[in-house]
Image (cartoon, rainbow, N blue to C red):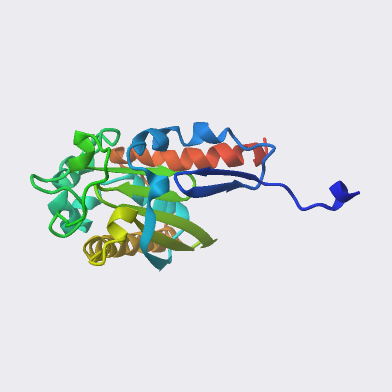
C-alpha cells in the first residue's frame, strides 16, 4: 500500500517566522513547552513581521556545542569584546555574572542598540516596554537558534553542524519593513558592529576546539561561572541517555 512505501513523516511547527522540524515526531516533546521562554522574552518584538535586511554566512572550525556554550556565558566578554562592553558595560563586571536576562541587559547611558555608537537613525520597534527600549535581550532556542534583540533590529543565528569540528553559521539581520521600505535604509551600522563581535566569538570558539583536540588532556575543568553552560550539556544528555547502555 501507499502507507508501506511513503516517506518518513516529520513534525513541523512555526514560531516567530522560523520553521522548526523534528525528525522523530513520535517522541518529539511538546513544541510550545520548548519555546516558552523565548515566546515570553520576545513577545513585543513582532518577530514574524520582521524581514531579513542582510545575511552573513560563517564557516567556524568548532563543534556546534562549543558555540552554544560561548553564547550561554559572558565571562569571556570583558577580555574578548571591548567594543561590545563599551555599549554594555555590565558585560565586563563580575565576569558577566548575575545578569538579569529575563528583564534584559542594560546599555550604557544614552545607548539604545548594538551599533558602534549605541545609536541609530532607525526607530525603535513599536510596542516595546521601557526596559526593552534601552536593554538587550538574548536567548538560545535549542538546539541551534540564537536570538539577540536590540530596540531596532534582531540578529538571528542558525547553526548547522557539518562535522564534529566544523559548523556553518547563518547570521540574519532582521528589521522592520517600515524601515526597510525607506530609500535611505542602511543596515551597515548594526551589521558592521555584529560582524566584529561575531569574528571575536568564532575565533575563541576555534581555540577551544583546538584545546579539546589536544591529546594531553584527560578531562576539562568548569569554572563556577559556567553554571548556565549546563543547559547545553543537559539538553544533549537528556536526548542520548535513552540510547546509552545500562
Residue 95, position as x, y percentages in the image: 20, 43
Residue sitting at the far left: 109
Q: Nearer the viewer, residue 223 or 182?
A: 182
Residue at image point 40% right, 67% down? 58
Identify whether 27 is placed above or below 77.
above
Residue 239 percent coordinates (x, y)? 58, 40
Q: Nearer the viewer, residue 245 or 96?
A: 96
Q: Quadrant of residue 44?
A: top left
Quadrant in the picture for the C terminus = top right
235 displayed left or right of 7:
left
Q: Residue at x 11, y 46 (%)?
A: 108
Residue drawn at point x = 8 percent, y = 44 percent: 109
Q: Nearer the viewer, residue 96 or 128?
A: 128
Q: Where's residue 97, x and y in %?
A: 23, 38
The total of numbered circles placed on residues is 0
Residue 115 vs residue 204: left or right? left
Which quadrant of the figure has residue 199? bottom left
Relative height, residue 97 to residue 158 (above, below): above
Residue 214 visible in rendering? no
Instruction: Please indicate whether residue 83 sits to the left or right of residue 240 in the image.
Output: left
Residue 48 makes an appearance in the image? yes
Residue 22: percent from left, percent from top: 61, 45
Amino acid at each position: 500500500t501507499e502507507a508501506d512505501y511513503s516517506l518518513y513523516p516529520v513534525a513541523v511547527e512555526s514560531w516567530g517566522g522560523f520553521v522548526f522540524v523534528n525528525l522523530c515526531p513520535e517522541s518529539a516533546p511538546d513544541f510550545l513547552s520548548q519555546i516558552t521562554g523565548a515566546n515570553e522574552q520576545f513577545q513585543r518584538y513582532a518577530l514574524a513581521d520582521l524581514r531579513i535586511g542582510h545575511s552573513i554566512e560563517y564557516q567556524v572550525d568548532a563543534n556546534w556545542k562549543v558555540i552554544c556554550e560561548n553564547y550561554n556565558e559572558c565571562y569571556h566578554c570583558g577580555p574578548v569584546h571591548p567594543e561590545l562592553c563599551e555599549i554594555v558595560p555590565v558585560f565586563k563586571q563580575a565576569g558577566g555574572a548575575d545578569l538579569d536576562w529575563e528583564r534584559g541587559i542594560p546599555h550604557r547611558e544614552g545607548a539604545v542598540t548594538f551599533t558602534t555608537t549605541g545609536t541609530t537613525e532607525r526607530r525603535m520597534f513599536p510596542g516595546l516596554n521601557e526596559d526593552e527600549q534601552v536593554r538587550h535581550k538574548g536567548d538560545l532556542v535549542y538546539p541551534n537558534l540564537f536570538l539577540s534583540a536590540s530596540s531596532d533590529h534582531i540578529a538571528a543565528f542558525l547553526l548547522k553542524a557539518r562535522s564534529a569540528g566544523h559548523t556553518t553559521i547563518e547570521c540574519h539581520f532582521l528589521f522592520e519593513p517600515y524601515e526597510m521600505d525607506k530609500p535611505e535604509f542602511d543596515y551597515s551600522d548594526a551589521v558592521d558592529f555584529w560582524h566584529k563581535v561575531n569574528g571575536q566569538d568564532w575565533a575563541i570558539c576555534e581555540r577551544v576546539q583546538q584545546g579539546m583536540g589536544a591529546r594531553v588532556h584527560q578531562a576539562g575543568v568548569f569554572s563556577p561561572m559556567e553554571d548556565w553552560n549546563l543547559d547545553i550539556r543537559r539538553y544533549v544528555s537528556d536526548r542520548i541517555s535513552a540510547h546509552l547502555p545500562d
